[in-house]
Each structure stands twice: as C-alpha cells, then as structure tokens.
Amino acid sequence: MALVPIRYNLRSLFVRFSSTVLTVCAVGATIAVFAGMLSLQQGFATLFQERGRDDLAIFLRKGATSEGESGITLEQCKILKNEVPEIERNEADQPLASAEMYLAVRLRKFDGGETNVAIRGVEPMSFQIHGDDVRITEGANFTPGSDELIVGEGLLDRIANCRVGDTLRINTGTFRIVGSFAGKGGYQSEIWGDLDRLQDALQRPVRSRVLARVPPDVDLAAIEQRYTDDLRLQPKVLNERAYLASQTSDLSARFLFVGGFLALIMGIGAIFTGTNSMLAAIGARTHEIGILKAVGYKPFAIFLSFLGESLLLGVLGGVAGCLIVLPFQGAETGTMNSTFSEVTFAFRTTPTAMLWSIVFAASLGVVGGLFPAWRASRMTPTEALRRG
Amino acid sequence: MPWKLLFRNLLGHKVRSLLTIGAVMVAVFLVCVLQAVTSGLSRTLDASAANRLLVQSAVSLFVDLPLGYQQKMASVPGVEAICKWQWFGGRYEQDKGGFFAQFGIDPETFATSYPEMTIADGSYEEFAATRTACIVGRQLADKYGWQVGDTVPMLGTIFTRIDGKPWDFTVKAIYESTSAAFDQQQMFFHYQYLRESLEQGGATGPDGVGVYMLKIEPGTDPLVVQRAVDGMFENGPQRVQTTTEAEFNRQFISMLGDVPQLLRLIGGAVLFAIFFAVLNTMLLTGRERTRDLGVMKALGFGNGVAAGLLIGESLLLCLTGAGLAIALGLLIEAPIAAVTASFIPGFALERDTLLLGAGIAAVVGLVSGVLPGVRAARMNTTQALQEIA
Amino acid sequence: MTAAIQLRSVTKTYSRGGEELRVLDELDLDMDDGTFYALMGPSGSGKTTLLNMVGGLDQADSGLVQVGDEDLAVMDGGELAQWRSEHVGFVFQGFNLLPVLSARENVELPLLLAPLSKRQRREQAERALTLVGLADRMNHKPRELSGGQEQRVAIARAIATDPQVILADEPTGDLDRDTADAVLELLQRLNRELNKTILMVTHDPQAASYADKTIHLDKGKLGRIEDNRTGAEG
C-alpha cells in the first residue's frame, strides 16, 4: 500500500503556520509541566541513587520507620558494636561501627522562614566508615569533644548562619561552624557535630542508630533474627541502600503521583486542542484529500498520513515543552522528607525525563489525531471534491 | 447585534465548540484546584485565635518540654488556663495505612479554651470523667463509622505498651467545629492516662509534653506573655518558643518551602495552554468566517458587529467552559477535601477562587476574540466576498 | 426618492504587484430610475468595480457617484454601511447565504438593521420569500436547497428591505440554463412589477437579453449602451 509522502504533511504544517505554532505552544505548556515534575523527581532520585551503599549496615530500634523515630541506649550501642561479628574492623582492630544521633532542628532560612534541618551527632569512627564519601570542602573537620560543627554543602545557600565562622545556638549550647562538607545524598543537607556535645546541649541522651561497615553480601536479616528473643535489645537491621530507598520512595512517589495527575488533566486539554487543530486543517484541505483519493491512495493511507501529522504536532509540542524546562536545569530547590527535614536537590532534566516527556507528547498527538484522521479517511472522493 | 447568529455559529460547528469548551473547562478546573490548595493554607492562618499562645521547644518539633514547666508557666501574669497537647502518633488498628492526628490533652481546660469545638454527639462530661475515653471529630467518625460507645484500638508507635496490645480508647463524644483551623479529623484523649501508663511501667515512651497551649486573659498583651515565658526558660533545660496560634500554623506552611511557588508556575503554564488553545480556535474560526462577515458588511452591518460576533463567540465558549468547570468542581469538592485532608488542610472552593477561574476564562475569551475580531473589522469587504469559503 | 444613478468622471486605481491599474477611467454614466440594466465587458474592464461603487461597497478615488440624492463618494465607512442597508440589495454569484441560518432567517438578516419589531421582520421576510416563490421552503437551511432555490432566497434577501436598487454580480454564473432563466425572469418581474432599478453584471449575452438596456465597458471607459427593447445603440 502506497503511503502518502511525508513531505505533504510537513508542507501543510508549514502552510498553516500560525495554527501549528499555537497548537505546539499549547501542547508545549502541558509537556513543560509534565517534564518539570519529572525533572523534580529525577533530581530527587539521582540524589539518593548516588548513595546507598550495600556495605554499610544501619541498626535502628525495632519498629522504627526512620532514624527520627528510633531510640537506642548507650548500653545497646556497646552491645551492637562489640557483639556483632559481621562488623568489619580497622587496622587497629577496632570495630568499624559508630553510634549516631539524629534530630530535625529548627533553623532560620535566608528568606526569613523557618525550616527543619537534620543535625547528626557522630563519633569519629563515622568518618572512617564513610571514607571518601564524606569530604571536607571548606575549613576543617570539627575536633572531637568540642562545640564545633561542620555544615553540608546543600545548606549553605538556604540556611542562615551556616558559613564557616558563624555560630549556631543549639538549645542552651553555642556551637561554632568550622567547616563545610560534601556528602552524597541526604548527608549533603545535614549538620554534623560531636555526639556527646550535641546530646549534652540538647539534653537528649538518646542515640538514633548504629552505623557499621560490613561485607557487601552479608545476611542482615540473619543478624536481626539472632536478636528476636534477646531481652536487651531487638534491633532492626538493614543496609544503607535499603534504608534510603525506604525514606525516599514516599516523596519520589508523591512527585510522580502529582506529576501524573497534572499531566493527565492537562493532557486531556492538550488532546482537545490538537484535535481541534487537525479537524480544522482537514476541513480546509478536503479538496486535496479528494484528489489524493481520486489519484488512488487508499483510505488507510490517508488515515495514517493525518495520524502521522498529528503525531508530528505532538512531538513538536514535546520538544517545545522540554526546551521550556531546560533553562531551569540545576536550579536548587528544597522540600521536606519524611521527618520534616529540609532536603535540597537540584532540578534535573535528564535524558530519561525528556524521553518520557516526548513519548507522552507523541501519544497525546496520536490520541488527538485519531478522530480527525478517521474522518479524513472516510470522506468519499466526490464529497471531498465537491466541497472544494 | 444578531444574537441568534452567535449561537447558531457555535452550534454549527458543534465538535469544534465542544472541544474548545472542553479545553477551557479542564484548564479552569485545574486553576481552581491549584488556587483552592494555596488559599486553603492561608485560610487556616486567618482563622487562628488571638487569645491562645502555643509553647514548644525552640530547638525541634521532635523535642518535648518537661512536665515541670506547666506549674512555672501558670504563675505568669495573664495566663488564664493551660492545656497540654501531646502528639501520640498512633495508627488505627483496622486501617494501619490511614493517617489522622491524635493528641493527649487536659480535658478540664481543653473545651473551654476551644469554643469553636461543639459537641455533636455524646457527652463531654463523660469524656472528662472517664480515663480511657476519647473524643473524635465528626469527619473522622464518619470515615470509620464510629459511634459513641465504640472502642477504638490504636497501635502506638511512639508510646508502646509493654504487653504489646493496642491502646483501647472509648468514644464518649463526637465533636464538630465552627472554625476552618480546627479540623474535624482529630482524636483527643486524656494526657493523664498516658502519663500514668508511663509511670507505672505499663508503657514506654518519651517523658514530657510536645506543646503547651496557654489561654490568656482578655485584655492581656500576648507579646508580654510570650516574652515572659521565653525568658523563663532561656537557660534550659529546654529552651522554648512561644508563638501565637497563627505563627504556629505558619511555621508548617513555610516548611513547605517552594511548593506554593511551584503551584504558581504550574498555574501559569495552564493559563498559557488554554490561551493558545482558545486563540487557535478563534483564529481558525475567524478565517473561515471571512466570507460570511463580508456578506454581513455588504448588507450594512458595521465593523463593530463583525468584530463583536467573533468576540461574543469567544467569550461564550470560554464562559461556558468555566461554568462547567465550576459545576464540576463544586460537585467533587467534598470528596477531594476528604481524600486530601491529611496533607492539604482546608481544601475548599471559595467564592473568590471560582471568580478567579471565571475571570481568567473571560479575559482569555476576550483577547482571543479581539485578535480575529479586529482583523474582521478592518478587512476589505469586496475582497472578503471573493474568498471561497 | 428617485434612484437615478449618476457617475461623473469616476476614476478608480488599484495597485497590484507594484503596478498601477486604472480600473475605471474618468467614467461618465447616467442610469434611469426603474430600469433593468445589464453591464457587460471583457475581463478587467471594471464591471464589478463599477457595481461595487454604485452599491457603496467601494469608493472612487475621484469623481461623483450619486445614487438618488446622495453622493456616495463623500460618505465614510459607517455612513456607507447605513446607506447600503436602506437603499441597496445585493445578489452575488456564489449566493452567499449564511449556512447556519434558515432561508427565512437569512432573509431577515438585513431587516435587523431596520427599526422593526420581531413580528414585522418576520412578516416582511415571509412576504419576500413568497414573492420569489419559496414560501414553502422558509425553514430550510441553504444546504437543503438547490442552487436555483438558494439564489432565489438571496434575491428575497436583497428585496426584503425594499431597496430601490438591486445590484447583481453574475447572478446566474453558477446555474444551469433552465434555472438561470427562471432567476432572470424573476429579476425581470421585480423590475416591471415593483419598479426596482436593477444593475446586473454578466458575461452571458443571453442573460443580458433579459435586461432593458445593456451597458458595455471597456478598459474602464464607457463603451456603447444598447437598448434591448428597441435595438437602438447609444
């Protein structure tokens, strides 16, 4: 079956230039929203995909869904550090395990509002465990046992009083910022300090978790199993990757949900606009359609031709939408995670986001073009030629 | 002005008219929903009371204040009553995925401090008299089909019982609220019951109270009380932050950060989309109508009529779309509000929101009609008549 | 009011593709009230332009265009529109009925510009349609009518406001022989029974034979005027 040459469709899109431009813009606006939401989700997801090591184990209190809910005593931390054989040791034969405290603390933003920022009290061993994943980029690391803090890079542009040399009031204690650090994922939006000093200032003798280095393929469920009937403690054990996935899946899903909802509704509007555009185009070209049919093109070829033209319109709209969104690339934004803490991430229009956007746009074009293309294919040559 | 012709033209191209109305309807609906979300947030701020202050940790949402603070605060001049608010954070046994707020409070001071709460069913006195009783909001009771006298088992996450069983609360009263800021999806029980369980070793959980509510005497300057209380605990053990109710609510909104801005951007995109859509329709219509309008002008109708017909059609399409969107919105407003209550407080389509939607549609209609309308008004009649339709 | 038409030194020039075309060149012409004129001439001779000029659809660059007591050349666009609605009826080659309105509604259209009540409009429209023999097709839409019927509706529309002058531009161009004759007979009747002045542009000599006189135009200037009844030329 002979197909109508694409040249014909391209030319007609160009001939009705203003209508094509307006339709592309309308579809483009829809796709921009879709691509925007996807970019937010991608920026968020990439942040956490970069992290999540499977050779780091996290011990929480049983039943806690996040560090914020978890509480472990000093005694329980000691037990975990010394009694779990799977925990690796360093050259000095010390267990690579560290107790940490996590609390979402109120801090002032630059724009005057307040937000919650994660403060993490760590032991010096934490730095050995993370290795190069946590690097001091400005100033110096805090001295253990002192009232000093280091600030994650992601916070520097959003939170007030976070620069090297500033002081922060944490409850009744005053701490000095001595450095900033780069850390992958959520650590980038945290403030770290000495575990004991922070606990003292906060009057909060509770630890949130024990972080430990383990072999990548170790059976963490088995460790958890071991303590089911232990009266002293019943930890929840999972690796860092699994933990972060559990924390972020909620927010990631929320972005996708909202994005999908908006895309659906706006998509319906875009389909209406596209259909209108195509119907008008076909109405103006009935004479040409009659000629095509008289010349011998089958109805199905006509159908495909117009469907293809509508698809092309959609794709152009998709490209327009992506172009609108691209300038926002790398813009930093923040939101709350499950513990209401600030999470900073960058807007990322990844190739994945763009691909899905264009696929979505193309499908809008196809759906919008079905009815007009069908109508065009059904026209009898005499009808078409007479109308012209 | 030939009104009949206006309607006939729209009816003569039913599919095009319906599609355009559809596009406008979708856009106006979205704009109204987005606006309802943002205005819902600010409404809860406006409804806050002026005679209630909230005392919380200056450091973190997640840090409790010592019990001993209550007596000290009671001695501050201007403080009429104090009510504790302790976040329970439990889950309803029969709907572990569902979310609603539960608080341990002081029944003696609670009802008198919150006059916007009205008892719809049951008895507040019985609630106050029974240690394990609870009072629930109308929307919450309706959602789960709770009646006065039912027992509600709650699984504790922050406060857990040693015996591993759920906490059983008996519904003694159901309340309704006259204020947007006091929502009807909450559950309140005796703080004292929690306290006793912790002291007697029947349960584990944090000591202390999340938030103290201070009701101040009429005529007292809230700022004075705020400063007094903050100053009282300046040196710990836990520093406090005393704020008005409005400021307290606002803190949650400011934590949303960029979300309102994002909503505004999306609203803008929706606006552009519908503007292009309607303009497209009207320009196409204008072009097709050239010969007809030429005839009208030849017959003696003025340029104003030619433009007016196109502007009128455009307005009619847009306002119809807006009307349908508003009707749809009002229809599903209640279900949406119920579904989103937990993360979007106070979702409601106010009159101002609907007017905004209609106004946007009208402006889009006007501008989209003016462009082809002006062209029609200016066009050369003899040339127009020669156009093949 | 007589509808004697007078043109004096009428000139109209169009610019096309950088060139200036003189479509009407210092044209002088007198037309009598109540006469049926055919206007003929080769393509580009200015016949349609002349028609448009007399109808107030177009304005001369210079010269006098007087219809009845009014000089059309000095009126502005709004005044011309008003004048058209009261004094002129148009019949076009392509019928030009509004497809979304019924026959009666199409005929009522020009009546909307007159200070008439709804009932009066309706009556006048029905009267016009009866005159052209289409009273039984009043509520049909144009697409439900044959070509000849459409043209008759157009004529009904043209006489609905009872103008003195009817201007027809190739009214039978799209019709077959028999239908064309019926339409031309109708025009003749309107002229003889109602004393309408008719100016009809045509390229068909047989159509022209229905008129009282035939005006010939050539290159924007007046050629000869034939009297179809007597055969005399002037």
Image (tube, coloured by chain):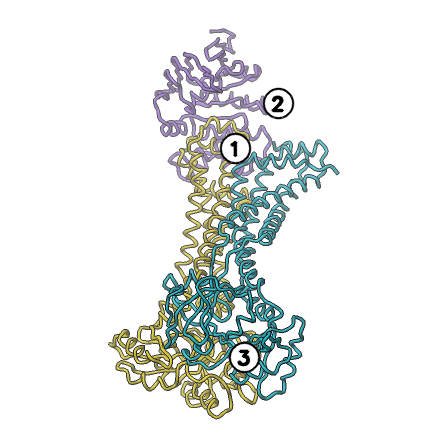
Chain colours: A cyan, B yellow, C purple
Q: Secondary structure at mark 3?
A: strand
Work out whether disc 2 and disc 1 sit on a shared chain.
Answer: yes
| Residue type of the residue flagged with mark 1 | Leu
Question: Where's residue B302, x and y in %?
Answer: 40, 33
Q: Which subunit holds the residue at mark 1?
A: C
Disc 2 versus disc 1: distance between alpha carbons?
A: 22 Å
In the image, farthest residue toward the front:
A92
Q: Quadrant of the C terminus of chain B?
A: top right
Whether B244 is drawn above or below A72: the answer is: above
- Res A162 visible: yes
Q: Of the residues shown, which amino acid type is indicated by label 2?
A: Asp
Quarter of the rendering containing residue B50: bottom left
- Label 2 neighbour load within 10 Å: few <14, some 14-19, many 20+: few
Percent of width and height locating residue B215:
32, 79
**Secondary element at tag 1:** loop
Q: Chain of mark 3?
A: B
| Residues at circles 3 and 1 in contact by the CB criterion of under 8 Å | no
Residue occupied by mark 3: B92
Q: Mark 1 sits on what residue?
A: C97
State the residue position of label 2.
C178
**Quarter of the image containing the N terminus of chain B?**
top left
Same chain under badges 3 and 1? The reply is no
The answer to the question of whether label 2 and label 3 lie on touching residues, with beta carbons closer than 8 A, is: no
Instruction: Identify which residue, A99 or B287, lies in the foreground.
Output: A99
